[in-house]
Amino acid sequence: MTWDYIVEGFLEALKLIISGDPDLYDILFRSITVSGLATFYAGLIGIPIGVVLGLSNFKGKEIVKSIFNGLMGIPTVVLGLILYLFLAPAGPLGFLNLIYTTTGISLGQMILVLPIVVSITVNSIESIEKDIRYLALTLGADEIQMMKKIIEEASPGILLSLMTAFNRAIAELGVALMIGGNIFIKGGEMNTRVLTTAIQMYVSRGEISMAIALGIVLLSLVYSISMVVNCVQRRWIEA
Amino acid sequence: MISLKRVFKTFGDKVALKDINLQVKEGEALGVLGYSGAGKTTLLKIISALDVDFQGTYLFKGIDVKEHPGKVRKSITMVFQNPVMFKGTVFENVAYGLKIRGYPRRYMEERIDEVLESLGILELKDKSAKRLSGGEKQRVAVARALVLDIDVYVFDEPTSNLDVENIKVVERAIKGLIERGKTVIFTTHDLLQARRLSDRILYIEKGEIVEVGKTEEIFKNPGDERTWRFLRAVL
């Protein structure tokens, strides 16, 4: 067993990152855009669902919550397969022409992370709902003002849901590979290669240094976002 | 002003309040005494229109509280035993009740300064409310209520987290409300405090009002054996 190829790959990867390798940065920016859009739309749909679920009390609420909780762990390959069956040219949604496009990947990732946004938003609301409800009401708030206050107080948790969603989206492989197809043509406009599909491809081709470089970039991105969000959250709560 | 008739409250199979009949006049200071778990906080939540899921009738100034809880809540505020703070500064916390009532910023600043100073916490005005100690939080919670110009102030153990010096400060603030003709209802485990602040005492045991009477009469000559036992056990 030798460490040489790992060390060499690692040093080569650092060179690629520092030298600003255009292919590497092209893949990075595409990944951020695709997963960023997925997270944005998941937030747009998932936060209102989470807020309504968190604030309401109805029969079957726990069942709805457990469905979303369960979907948080859906295997990305299975979701990728389901989406492929629907979006493929012969599939029921083939006319949308979303297969092998970045929009298709964003759509798939949005579906993947929507349960995360909903579940974490519901938990954030429920964890403070009772205390803040009573406090706002006893200070004279009406129902609308009380709900606004609960959402405001839960905002660090809602922000956490978006961060977790983005990190899950950018780090998943199944949807990006099956819907995107890992297409890359230098200078092409229809490229769908993202960080995870590229890592998988470079490893299978034996180009370890590029795979390690992309791995470092992906990890750094995920950790940086987590750290920034944690700082914002802390300042928000303790402001 | 406050009229509860045949009020019952249950949590599942457990009866928390049993046949509560209570009248509180405007400007009165009512001390609610009882052991832990006797139903004091449940009663206060109903009086504050925070819990309208009960059986019986509760009229506040002739308004049916079950029908119009929002209207009644504009006139009553409750300070909880374990104060919850909103995100943000002490100022923002204390300003919340004034802000939603639409008071101008200048009035809010003057009023909040005045109240914070009276409670000895003016220097905490710009501090993060969540970072305060338990005693400081309790005084901020009292301040949030005091800035409001409303009819009824309900306090659930308002001095339980405070040292002797700050107990005096909060008691002085509550006395100020009573002197201004406000209605004050409070619970306490400190019988001397109840004696100092209240016009009438209500003793509750196992969800039932055992007796209500003038403070001195209850302390000197309780009408019920159970009240007498409680006072003897605590004093």
Image (tube, rainbow, N blue to C red):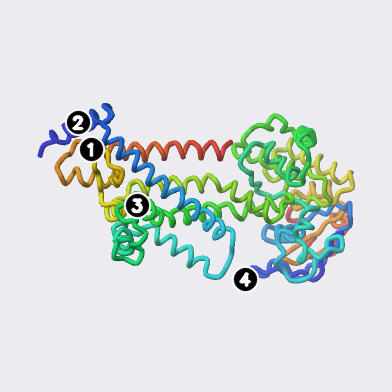
Label 4 and label 2: CA atoms lie apart by 67 Å
Label 1 and label 4: CA atoms lie apart by 59 Å
User: SS of the residue at dot 3?
Assistant: helix
Q: Are marks 4 and 2 in contact (CB under 8 Å)?
A: no
For badge 4, the amino acid type reads Gly
Label 2 and label 3: CA atoms lie apart by 30 Å
Q: Is residue B158 above or below residue A178?
A: above
Residue situated in front as seen by the camera: A236 or A130: A236
Camera-side mark, 2 or 3 = 3
Left or right: where A85 falls relative to B130: left
Label 1 and label 3: CA atoms lie apart by 23 Å
Residue A53 image position (x, y, % from top left): 54, 60
Q: Residue at x 55, y 46 (%)?
A: A155
Label 1 and label 2: CA atoms lie apart by 9 Å
Camera-side mark, 4 or 3 = 3
Chain hosting mark 3? A
Residue ID for mark 1:
A212
Q: Is residue A232 above or below residue B178?
A: above
